[in-house]
Image: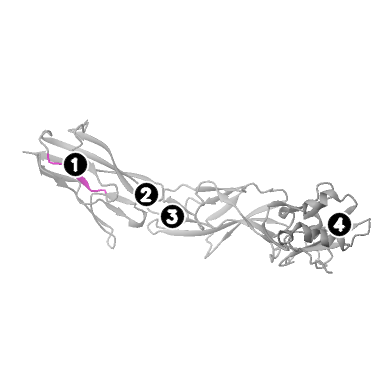
Amino acid sequence: MAVLAGSSLSSCRKTELEEIVNLGYLPPFTLPDSLALTYGQKIQLDLPAEYQNLPDVTLALSFRDNAAVKVNATDSLTTLVARAVTVDQATRKVSIDAGQLYPSTTTSSTSGVRTPRNYLATLTATSSTGFKAVKSHIKIKVLPAQLNIVEIPTTDIIPYGYGIYDNKPLYYTVDYAGLNATNTQLVLEVNGRPDGKVSIAKQQVVVAADAGDSDQKAEWIYDLLPTLTKDGYRVAYRQFRVVLMPKPKFFFGTYYSDYNLTILENRLVLQLGKAYTSKAPTFYPAKYQGTYALKTIEKDGAPFTDSYKIFSVDAATGKITIAPNTVLAAGEYKLTLQTQATTGLTLETALTLVMEQ
């Protein structure tokens, strides 16, 4: 009777296991025959509980199925895998440390060597009391890890950072996300047409103060890829984009972008006590538009408390509404509207309403 390596005990009832042992075989392993791990990930694999009661059994790992190739200055592929995959005779556990390997099918920029599609290990159990040995072949695929950018939420596949032209550099800190940085190097790849305005200094990506459009009028996007390498192999990275743009235009009035022409409509004369709804404020570029809130109200230059909730703002559009009322006195009411653009920038603009009888 042959025992298949890696066959599952979940389908073997206790009586079937006893039959296998009675035929002279050790209990079959329940290890997965294929694993996909992320660089830096550590896992432990348990052998069947029956192995805890078999003190005469010896466990051994073999790595001969790996190609005879040198993957760095000191290690062969076999040596590398042997350091990453170990077995504990006492606890009957197999440990795999993907941080000791390199991501699969990755080519080293220093040696030109390409890692295999799978790293291979074979676990063998032998008995000193006559039971026939069993084996389990394990294929291990390693995926590159992801870095984080401290200043940008990294929930999106490709996160965006935003900046305005203000002649100041921007800094983005690379977080190794718990990875061991020993013997690694952080490098920066710039997709598209690099202009030399973005660099890396220690653990920060630096966007120069004069980066982007030379006239500081057009939106400019840098597609960046900070990459952690080890022995020339890419082990972790994070793609993100930095968008540089002029300060968004935010005011009550009309903007003609083709001519860069602004017409302000931020002072209006209204009849006292009548209902009124303003036009929506202009926000340009519109794609960065956020939500709106009424920050302050002044009457004739002094703070005004809107006890009757006469003034309100539509959070989605920024339109200001005045409810019909009999409590407002004639005068100039300055309403300051605030918005937080999707870039994170907070902007303010004011609308002055002159109430007359």
Q: Which residue is mark 2?
A: 341
Q: Which residue is mark 4?
A: 60
Q: Earlier in the sequence, mark 2 or mark 3?
A: 3
Mark 3 Cα-neighbour bin, 10 Å: few <14, some 14–19, many ≥20: many
Mark 1: amino acid = Thr
Cα distance, mark 2 to mark 3? Answer: 14 Å
Question: Real-space Cα distance between discs 4 and 2?
Answer: 60 Å
Name the residue nearer the viewer: 319 or 108. 319
Amino acid tagged 2: Ala
| Helix, strand or loop under label 2 | loop
Q: CA distance from mark 3 to mark 4?
A: 57 Å
Amino acid identity at mark 3: Leu
Asked if disc 1 and disc 2 are in contact, CB closer than 8 Å, the reply is no
Residue drawn at x 88%, y 54% is 58
> Where, by quadrant of the figure, is residue 356 drawn?
top left
Label 4: state its secondary structure.
strand
Q: Residues within 10 Å of mark 2 (few under 14, many from 20)?
A: some
* Nearest to N terminus: mark 1 or mark 3: 3
Q: Residues within 10 Å of mark 1 (few under 14, many from 20)?
A: many
- Residue span colored magenta: 318-324
Residue 285 in sight here: no
| Label 4 vs 2, first from the N-terminus | 4
Residue position for label 3: 244
* Mark 1 to mark 3 CA distance (whole Å): 32 Å
Q: State the residue at coordinates (72%, 61%).
A: 32
